[in-house]
Image (spheres, grey):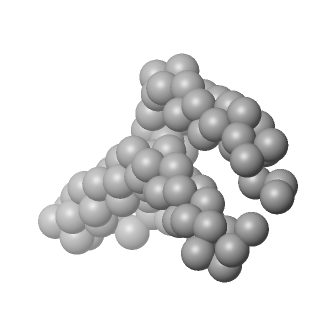
Amino acid sequence: MTPEFVTGIGKQAIEVILMVSAPVLIAGMAVGLAVSIFQAVTQIQEATLSFVPKIIVVFLVILFLSPWMMEVLLRFTAQIFTNIPNYVN
């Protein structure tokens, strides 16, 4: 196992992590921005107003995208397990 090979596996793992987490993070940031703009316009400074919509949106994104997320993670894991004999030389 060469350092380049290990680096390649690490790169693939980071790509999978970013691909799976990006929709949740982007949705949370978008709702946070919208709530912040709403709070600035209306001058409502309620702390719970920023958390509840983000929690709901993140939960819904995870609920709807969980089959795709599991497919990506399972595909990556299956690839790693299938290639174990190739990793050991």
Residue 23 seen in render:
yes
Q: Tell me: 36 left or right of 4.
A: left
Q: Is residue 71 above or below residue 33?
A: above
- Give the number of marks: 0
Q: Nearer the viewer, residue 62 or 57?
A: 62
Q: Nearer the viewer, residue 55 or 25?
A: 25
Residue 14 seen in render:
no
Q: Is residue 4 above or below residue 31?
A: below
Residue plotted at (39% across, 69% down):
45
Residue 25: x and y, percent? 44, 55
Residue 89: x and y, percent? 82, 58
Residue plotted at (80% across, 43% down):
85
Residue 69: x and y, percent? 53, 33
Q: In the rendered view of the protein, which quadrant contains the N terminus?
A: bottom right
Q: Is residue 44 above or below residue 52?
A: below
* View extreme (front): residue: 89
